[in-house]
């Protein structure tokens, strides 16, 4: 009886978060450190008495920042219930009270006090002039906020929410908190500009005039003029979504359901476009199919075809986006195709169904989650893409480029940019709704807890021939594009002076030995190392957040689930230019002051790329029988153990997709990076764009080629580390 009582009154997770809060308040610098926390120079520069590095308790002891004092009382409250049982009503009430009041007060003082004292005149009227200022929160404030959040979560779980599961409740709280902070808050700041008048007021009339602008919704293309940018973007996104889904499925079927001799090489080629900065693909297309491109000149000289500007506009943007986004569809679909249970296909064959009937009535319907998610991602990527329309758009305007010019152009109209972003978001959410309607509430479970030894059959011959032809032709086209890029890095001036040279690589990545050791003298080393560090940090964090979110969406039922899913997709639906500008507006002032740091780059990459991990995870988890979870819980495992030991090992394709995509997009991102880089944290893409603007195409292409090789190496390493999902004894294809 004594043992049971002790078990009921010891709360290790709660104690851990109480300690985290106390460490944040008593030991770590409360405000952000200009030179960076992990430089640790602050430890030797007056810590803990120097105000710039002092913990909150030392600031209070000095008589400074007295508004932090109430936080200490909220931190002490949980200590009074450490010896109480979870079943005691006071246990949950006090935890919820402590966490909610602590978070609320932290939020209020963070936004109420800024760089010039009180941020709002009405507070100043009540309390008078503050005579002090506040800086952006540091790791001390971050730890305390986390402690309050998860303390409150444990209180909610103790009240029986979601069966009292601490892991699930804490995961939901954590995802909601970070999505609210780094997605909804900055986007809300940006979208408010849609209602701002010239005298800084708010007006619905101003919003309506910009929303119903003819430049946005015009249908002039029906009688030979130009259509509005909204219709251009919608048409382009639908085409890209359909084509990338078909090509992604073709590649996935060739790799998993065919005896094609070169399918490993084919699989490698599918990854190439995603590891390439988009403007490089556009440049390669221009030098192949532009007015003076190699292919254009060939047809002009041999067949007498007059050169045209057909590439600039919808055709060129469509080709470039399909090249860039097909790998996303493939990465999503490969896991889904592999996850279809062979036993179901074998059962259909046993009932004398032909291979075509098996594929049409069994295999393809079970792939619907992957097909829907692949289309949605292709649609959203096309909508949000900035680089390809910028290079190849010509007179074909789309929403993302119009947003960019509204922000950085001569007009500088944040209101117009916000309205355009709202329209883009409407289209994206409409696609999201259509996807959910198409999937319905049908079950796509194919992997259960029962052992099975089946292997996938080959595709029917009527299907395999066109699929292999389509995949081979597209792979060949991709290979030509990349051969051109590689060739361009070794010539003096691509298309003008084609003399072979290594000078571009030497200029970018030269290394010298000196008395003091190795000197990285190349012009690109600084941006290259920064990019690797940022991408390597962002990729696993993106995968973790994405897969935990997917687990919550597929395995748990809770109030507000649809809104929760919407929130996780919102950042993906907004162009990178809007994300960049909104982050500057939101995080350039207290309480979160991170502009000019590496943190803002990592955060933007996490929440910009998280939806891919979410969608890939949802597609894979839709095929996992919930009886696996139930069996694990029945045997005494908790939700965290079930997630780590049961779910994750069966989701290796989704994990790989999340890691690869997040790493690659962090390495090749353009639109948001333009606004968020600084002198200290310069990214590879911004450096390459600078070279392109200076007409130094050789160096830009050489740098891009080096990035491609590095990313391919990292992808190969990730495949080895993550491994493959082994279900049953699927070792070979069955004819």
Image (tube, rainbow, N blue to C red):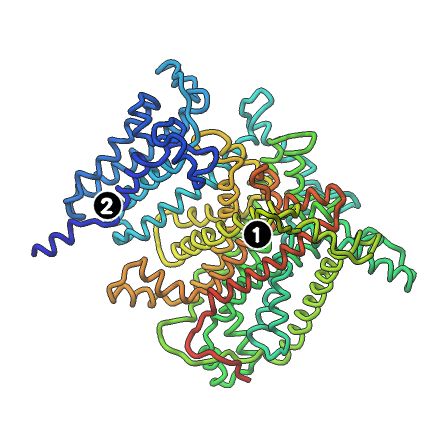
| Left or right position of 517 against 55 | right
**Can you say whether 131 is above or below 194 in the image?**
above
Q: Quadrant of the C terminus?
A: bottom right
Task: Please name the residue that numbered disc 2 is placed on.
Answer: 15
Q: Are marks 1 and 2 in contact (CB under 8 Å)?
A: no
Sort mark 1 into few (<14), some (14-19) or many (20+) by Cα contacts within 10 Å.
some
The residues tagged by marks 1 and 2 sit, at their Cα atoms, a distance apart of: 38 Å
* Secondary structure of residue under mark 2: helix
User: Is residue 415 at least partly visible in the picture?
Assistant: yes
* Secondary structure of residue under mark 1: helix
Instruction: Give the percent coordinates (x, y) of residue 669.
Output: 60, 48
Most foreground residue, 694 or 419: 694
Most foreground residue, 415 or 254: 254
**Can you say whether 56 is above or below 340 in the image?**
above
Q: Quadrant of the N terminus?
A: bottom left
Residue 665 image label: 1
| Left or right position of 91 against 310 | left
Whichever of callouts 1 and 2 sits on the residue coming sooner in the sequence is 2
Using the rendered view, name the quadrant where residue 2 is placed. Answer: bottom left
Sort mark 2 into few (<14), some (14-19) or many (20+) by Cα contacts within 10 Å.
some
Residue 398 image label: none
Most foreground residue, 653 or 593: 593
User: Is residue 240 at least partly visible in the picture?
Assistant: no
Using the rendered view, name the quadrant where residue 240 is placed. Answer: bottom right
| Left or right position of 389 against 548 | right
Using the rendered view, name the quadrant where residue 325 is placed. Answer: bottom right
**Can you say whether 127 is above or below 271 in the image?**
above
- Residue positioned 55% across, 64% down in the render: 716
Instruction: Give the percent coordinates (x, y) of residue 324.
Output: 64, 56
């Amino acid at each position: 009886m004594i043992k049971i009582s002790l078990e009921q009154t010891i709360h290790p997770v709660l104690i851990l978060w109480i300690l985290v809060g106390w460490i944040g308040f008593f030991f770590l610098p409360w405000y952000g450190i200009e030179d960076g926390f992990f430089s640790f120079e602050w430890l030797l520069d007056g810590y803990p008495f120097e105000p710039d590095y002092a913990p909150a308790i030392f600031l209070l002891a000095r008589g400074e920042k007295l508004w932090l004092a109430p936080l200490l009382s909220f931190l002490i409250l949980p200590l009074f219930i450490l010896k109480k049982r979870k079943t005691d009503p006071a246990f949950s009430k006090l935890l919820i009270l402590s966490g909610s009041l602590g978070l609320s007060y932290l939020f209020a003082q963070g936004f109420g006090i800024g760089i010039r004292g009180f941020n709002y005149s009405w507070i100043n009227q009540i309390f008078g002039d503050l005579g002090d200022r506040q800086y952006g929160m540091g790791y001390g404030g971050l730890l305390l906020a986390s402690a309050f959040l998860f303390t409150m979560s444990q209180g909610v779980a103790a009240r029986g929410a979601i069966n009292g599961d601490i892991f699930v409740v804490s995961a939901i709280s954590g995802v909601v908190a970070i999505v609210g902070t780094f997605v909804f808050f900055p986007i809300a700041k940006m979208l408010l500009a849609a209602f701002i008048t010239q005298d800084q007021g708010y007006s619905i009339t101003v919003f309506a005039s910009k929303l119903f602008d003819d430049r946005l919704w015009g249908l002039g293309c029906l009688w030979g003029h130009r259509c509005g940018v909204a219709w251009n973007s919608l048409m382009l996104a639908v085409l890209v979504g359909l084509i990338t889904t078909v090509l992604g499925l073709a590649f996935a079927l060739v790799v998993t359901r065919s005896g094609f001799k070169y399918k490993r090489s084919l699989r490698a080629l599918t990854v190439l476009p995603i590891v390439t900065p988009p403007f490089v693909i556009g440049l390669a297309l221009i030098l192949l199919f532009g007015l003076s491109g190699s292919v254009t000149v060939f047809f002009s000289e041999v067949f007498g075809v007059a050169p045209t500007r057909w590439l600039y506009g919808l055709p060129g943007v469509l080709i470039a986006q399909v090249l860039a986004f097909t790998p996303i569809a493939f990465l999503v679909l490969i896991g889904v195709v592999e996850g279809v249970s062979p036993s179901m296909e074998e059962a259909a064959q046993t009932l004398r169904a032909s291979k075509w009937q098996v594929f049409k009535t069994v295999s393809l319907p079970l792939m619907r989650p992957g097909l829907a998610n692949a289309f949605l991602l292709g649609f959203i990527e096309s909508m949000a893409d900035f680089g390809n329309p910028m290079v190849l758009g010509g007179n074909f305007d789309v929403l993302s480029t119009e947003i960019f010019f509204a922000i950085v152009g001569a007009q500088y109209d944040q209101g117009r940019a916000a309205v355009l972003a709202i329209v883009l978001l409407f289209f994206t959410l409409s696609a999201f709704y259509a996807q959910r309607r198409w999937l319905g509430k049908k079950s796509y479970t194919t992997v259960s807890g029962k052992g099975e030894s089946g292997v996938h059959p080959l595709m029917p011959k009527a299907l395999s021939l066109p699929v292999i032809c389509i995949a081979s032709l597209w792979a060949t086209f991709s290979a030509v594009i990349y051969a051109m890029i590689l060739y361009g890095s070794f010539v003096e001036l691509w298309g003008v002076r084609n003399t072979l040279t290594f000078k571009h690589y030497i200029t970018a990545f030269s290394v010298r030995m000196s008395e003091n050791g190795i000197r990285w003298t190349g012009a690109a080393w600084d941006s290259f190392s920064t990019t690797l560090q940022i991408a390597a940090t962002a990729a696993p964090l993106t995968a973790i957040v994405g897969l935990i979110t997917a687990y919550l969406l597929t395995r748990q039922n809770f109030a507000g689930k649809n809104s929760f899913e919407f929130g996780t997709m919102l950042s993906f639906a907004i162009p990178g230019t809007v994300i960049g500008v909104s982050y500057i507006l939101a995080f350039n002032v207290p309480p979160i002051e991170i502009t000019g740091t590496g943190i803002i780059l990592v955060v933007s990459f996490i929440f910009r790329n998280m939806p891919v991990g979410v969608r890939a995870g949802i597609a894979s988890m839709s095929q996992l029988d919930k009886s696996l979870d139930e069996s694990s819980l029945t045997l005494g495992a908790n939700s965290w153990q079930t997630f780590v030991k049961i779910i994750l090992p069966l989701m290796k394709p989704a994990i790989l997709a999340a890691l690869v995509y997040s790493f690659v997009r962090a390495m090749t991102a353009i639109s948001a990076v333009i606004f968020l880089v600084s002198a200290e944290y310069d990214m590879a893409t911004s450096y390459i764009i600078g070279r392109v603007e200076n007409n130094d195409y050789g160096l830009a292409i050489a740098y891009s080629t080096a990035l491609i090789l590095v990313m391919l190496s990292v992808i190969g390493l990730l495949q080895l580390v993550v491994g493959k999902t082994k279900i049953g004894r699927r070792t070979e294809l069955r004819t």
